[in-house]
Image: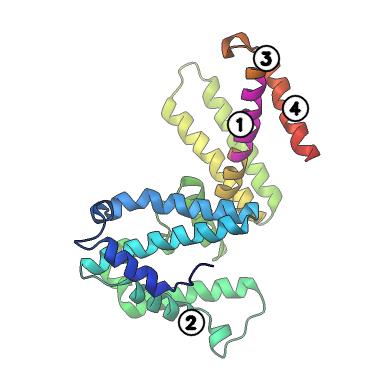
Amino acid sequence: MSTKRTFQDLVEMMARLRSANGCPWDREQTYATLGPMLIEEAYEVIEAAEAGDWNELRDELGDLLFQIVFYGQIAAEDGHFDVNDSITRVHEKMTRRHPHVFGEETVDSTADVLSNWEAIKAAERKASGKDQQEEKKASMLDGTSSKLPALLEAFQLTTKAARVGFDWQQSDDIFDKLEEEIRELRDEFKRESRNPEAIAAELGDVLFVVTNIARWHGVEPETALKATNRKFRRRFAHVERRVEEQGKAWNDTSLAEMDSFWDEAKQIEREQ
């Protein structure tokens, strides 16, 4: 049976890996090189959780934690802070922002919790002087990173705006907006002289509205699209197998045949 390890064990391992007698690869890593790996590990955590694969989720959480400790080690080496400082800060912040749990305040709903959360954040900014010191951070939307995947960024932006009442009043209104944006996109395609920039702008509007439909109905769009991507991979893999079984090359296989193999994959999924 494996020896149980603690968070501090992982921190000490990372310090050794980055030391002069450690691993050359680990010593070469920077925030920039770690970024894609951190994002990949986060998505793998989500995928394992959605699949209900608990062994995989256990391992992927460890991989994600390793990346976080990696960031903390580099920051410590640069003399900025260590990962334990990050733990302390988030513990303090979550305590402040949950006065209904750790204080005397009461709430009646999740909406109350979110409203209080934004009010507490605003008070924190004012108390720290950030509102005066950082003119760039004058909007409540500034806390949403522009480095996020586009669908997730749109989801986060409109979630924050909705918390102060900037939102559609009912679901049908969003579907009406979607139909309007699709019409505008079609109109751009119908123009004799197509403008690629205008088409891209209208397509972006369509995707933005679709993101809001997802938000309104409690669906995280980035995760939903990832699930559809995985479904496409599974079904296309079946098409590939069937084409190979036929002994044909792709250019000898008709679209009708490929569609029939695709339908087979769908039927197999339904039966399973």
Q: Is residue 10 left or right of residue 174?
A: left
For marks 1 and 4, the one nearer the N-term is 1
Residue 186 in view: yes
Separation of disc 4 and disc 2 at Cα?
53 Å
Which span of residues is magenta-colored? Answer: 230-242
Check if mark 2's residue and mark 1's residue have beta carbons within 8 Å.
no
Q: Position of residue 238 (x, y in %)?
A: 66, 28
Dot 1 amino acid type? Arg
Residue that carries the numbered disc 3 in the rendered image = 246
Mark 4 lies on residue: 264
Determine whether the residue tagged by mark 3 lies in a helix, strand or loop.
loop
Q: For residue 253, what is the image quadrant?
A: top right
Residue that label 1 marks = 183
Name the residue rendered at 56%, 26% in the picture. 187
Name the chief secondary structure element in magenta.
Answer: helix
| Mark number displayed over residue 95 | 2
* Mark sitting earlier along the chain (4/2): 2
Residue 207: image quadrant is top right
Secondary structure of the residue carrying numbered label 1: helix
